[in-house]
Structures are given as C-alpha cells and as structure tokens.
Amino acid sequence: MSRARSHLRAAFFLTAVSPRGATSWIAARRELSARPAPQEPGMEYQAKRQRGDPQKQLEAMELYLARSGLQVEDLDRLNIIHITGTKGKGSTCAFTERILRNYGLKTGFFSSPHLVQVRERIRINGQPISPELFTKHFWRLYHRLEETEDSNSCVSMPAYFRFLTLMAFHVFLQEKVDLAVVEVGIGGAYDCTNIVRKPVVCGVASLGIDHTSLLGDTVEKIAWQKGGIFKRGVPAFTVLQPDGPLAVLRERAEQTSCPLYLCPPLEALEEGGLPLTLGLEGEHQRSNAALALQLAHCWLQQKDHRGVGEVKASRPSLLRQLPLAPVFQPTPHMLRGLRDTEWPGRTQVLRRGPLTWYLDGAHTSSSVQACVRWFRQALHRCKEPRSGTEVRVLLFNSTGDRDAAALLKLLQPCQFDYAVFCPNLTEVSSTDNADQQNFTVTLDQVLLRCLEHQQHWSRLDEEQACPEPGGPTSLLLAPHPAHSHSTSSLVFSCISQALQWISQGRDPVFQPHSPPRGLFTHPVAGSGANVLREAAAIHVLVTGSLHLVGGVLKLLEPSLSQ
C-alpha cells in the first residue's frame, strides 16, 4: 500500500466507516499506529510537500479528476461561484450561499478548514453532508482511484485536500445542486480548486499577508496568486484593496480578458431602502456582505433568474482603477439571506451563565485587528451593572510560519487579566479524533510553540511595564504594567484542560470530569482559579488558529460532533 494512500485512510478512519465494516476500521487504526510520522492533512503542508512546477500540480489534479471518472468539462454543470481572498473569503461564501438558497435554489458549498468534523467542508443547502452520505462518497471515490492507480507513479492517491476537493465535486454532481460555492484553499492560481474552467462568477475578498512561504512576502505577490482564479469572459468582483494589490488584480484581469469590478460599500446599497442587518457580527463583515451581494446578484443575472433587484445608477470608481459594480436595491431574499447567515467560529458569541465565549479564528494581522475591534465593541455593548469582578481571558494559539509575536501585540489593548495558551488538541490523547489530528508534530513540539507564545506575551508585558515592588507577577514573572493592569499567563497541554481552568465548572454545558492531578497546582493557576470562581462575569476571547476555535466548539457545543 502506498504511503499517500495509508495517510489518507489514517486521516479519515474515524469519519468514514467502510462498507466492509469493522475490519477496515481496525485495519485503518493499525495502519495509523504503524506509521511513526504520518502526514498532516493540512493544505499548506501538502502544498509545500508537493512543491515543484505549480502548473504540473494543476495538471496532476486534472489527472486525478479523470481517474475518478470526471472530466473538467463536467464541472461546468455545477454553475460555480469561485471565491478567494486572505480574510473574509469563508464568510463571503457563507453570505453568498445563504442568499441564493433563499431563492429556492439547491446549493452546494465547499469550504476549508473544518472546525469539528471533516464533513462540514461539503455542504448541501447549508448543512454538512450526513455521515452516511460522506461514507458512501468517500469509499466510492477511494476505490475508483485505487482501481485506476499507476504502479509506476510516485503518488498514486491524492493528498488530503485534493481528495476532499474531488469528493466535493462528485457529491455536488450526484446530488444535482443548482450551484456550488467553492472556496479556494490557499492562494488561487495553483490551488487545486482552480481546475474549474468556467465558473459563473469569481470573487476576491480582502487581501493581506498569509502563507508567505507559498504565496510570497508582499501583498502584491499574494494578489498575483489570488488573481489566478480569473477566467476569460467570466465577471469578477473585489472589495476595496490598497492601491498596490488592486493594480495587480486589475493587471491579472486585463491579461485574462476578465471583466473585474470594484464593489461599492454596503452603505451605497442601503440608501433609500431598508438598513441591512448581518447575521455575522463585526464591522469587517460589511465588506464581505457587499461582495456576497454582488456575487449573488451577478449569478442570478447570468442565469436569467427573476427578482435580482432594481439597478440604480452606477457611480465612478474613487480609485479610477476599476469600474464600480452596479448599485442595486437588495431584494427581500437578499436581505433575509444576509440576516440569517451563520458561520461558526467567526465573530461567534456563546453566553453561558457568568461566562461569555467570543470565538473568532484570526491568523493574520488584519484579521486580528478586526477581531480586537469586534471584541471591544461587543464588551462595550454588553456593559451592565454587576455587583462583582469582571475577568477577561485570552485563549490563543498560532501555527505554521505566522508571526505569533506580532499577532499577540495586537491583542494587548484588550487588557486581559489572563492569557492562556494551548495546542490545537482537544485532549492530551486525541487518537479518538482524526478530524482534528495533526499528523506531523509531536505533543512536545506543539507545547514548545505554546511556551514561545507565553514568552512573547511576557516580553510584551515587560515592554509596557513599570515595576512595582510587591506587585503581582505572571507565570514568567512579568512585572506590573504602567497602566496598572497585569496579565498572568499560563500554558496547558490541551484545550480541555484550558477550558476546565477557565470555566471552573461554571459553564452549564461544559462539565468535564475532575481535572488531572496537579492541573491547578501552579501558584498562578491556583490563585487564578479562585478569581474565576468568584467573578461576576468572565469574558473569554478564543482566537488565532481556526483549529483552536474548532476544538473549543467541539467541547462547548457537543451537538456539533453528532
């Protein structure tokens, strides 16, 4: 059995039970334990591993598609909306899908990463496909690829993200969706979703710095990659970007003969009509909603659908680089779609007794800045007279080649009382959860990174510090800051332990077994536990890695695992 094939089985063995029954289940577990360092199913790792001629990677994806029984032309039937960007592309996809579903259309939605279960990545009418449907399509595709493998090829099975992309296309075609909203994995030009040759419309959400080892170290280089999804004659839309990357997008569009439009702000669509209410919180979501409205409006026009909204007079672009997209009156279907959009783990709030959990995956500087604005505004809105102490807690982790110190610095204005760091592991032993397993790193490695995060935080505290004799200290003895607000920091081995310490049994849903022996013996953990038990309100911001947010949701919302 090839290495790629065994890794694929290892990644899925808890989600897709083979029709062959328990034998395959046991065999997959044995295969997993027999491999000392199976590969991470993360897109970035796979992209690095398969780096070479990027165009050949797309050609390889077309070969996988052919081996699976489809041709690129078959994907034209999916009426795809292809969306990329650095931040907000997932939310834009969610808004777009919800709007079009309100028109009575059967929608497919492929996104990444998942938060709790891998089947979240493939949705029909907004809902993750069922375990039974996932199982059926997984093994059907797996065996088809197995039967057509070339013994002379060094890679006989597609990697994790490629496999899921192929599977999504098969599911959407078999389920006969009216359209598919497809989110790019990484970049655009050489992303495996870019084998789509004739999408109906394309979108580019806000651009920023991320995945620099793959996409480049400037926003302009990243814009070049994102603009790679543009297709000849296919309309594309983008939101307001800095001049440099916007010029790159315009150049890419001109080279491809792609009509590219700049989205007017949401305020322009509100004039003379009803105010727009968004189901996703945060000022930054208005940009995503504006893009989603244009994508949905264009798709409906391209498909000659009725009720697309009355077009008003268009205004000249302020930047004079791109024509402004039409200003139109959003229809009731569009208004309801924006209002009813849900996208877990993004500006999400869970209120549980004295605890309020704020969850927002943010792993770039711009997305963390947006997260901080949202969190502080949310705190301001919920100000109520309370007889007791209010405590603010940060739960953070960051992975990959991201600059964690820079991200943590942006979080400091929130004035947290405690900064908690842990790996993206729900439990110390998480072999029962392949959906959230990272197969390339050991517990020691991820804990070392968490300790580095703690050290970054303590150094940031010290930079602001004005030592006070006898003042409280953090876990690494950071002195009391000059603004008389100190942050104590802790590292836990997994998400469950971190949540146990933060909640202190006061979350009515998250009620774990007794904590491991010695969990709260550190002086900071012990004194902090007393503070948390007596606090009138505890505000917890969970941010950084989306995988961290997913692990927290798995424990706080058990229904998501069912």
Image (tube, rainbow, N blue to C red):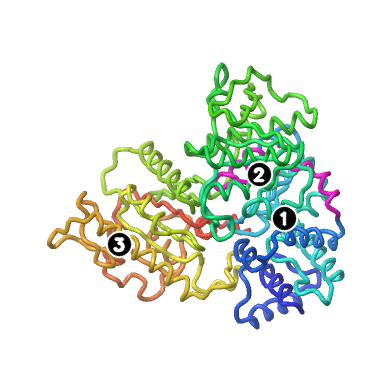
- Kind of element beneath mark 2: strand
Report the residue marked by disc 1. Answer: 130
Q: Which residues are magenta?
A: 71-97
- Kind of element beneath mark 3: helix
- Kind of element beneath mark 1: loop
Q: Amino acid at mark 3?
A: Ser
Residue at x-position 20% and y-position 57%: 480
Which sits in the foreground, 87 or 12? 87
Residue at x-position 41% and y-position 57%: 395
CB atoms at circles 2 and 1 under 8 Å apart?
Answer: no
User: Could one spot residue 97 in this view of the protein?
Assistant: no
Q: Amino acid at mark 2?
A: Ile
Tell me if mark 1 has few (under 14), some (14-19) or many (20+) residues whose alpha carbon lies within 10 angstroms of its own.
some
User: Could one spot residue 454 in this view of the protein?
Assistant: yes
Quarter of the view holding residue 291:
top right
Report the residue marked by disc 2. Answer: 83
Quadrant holding the C terminus: bottom right
Residue 351, x across and y down, in percent: 44, 46
Q: Is residue 337 left or right of residue 547?
A: right
Residue 30, x across and y down, in percent: 68, 81
**What is the spatial separation of the Cα atoms under label 3 and label 2, in whole angstroms?**
39 Å
427 is higher (above) or lower (below) than 487: below
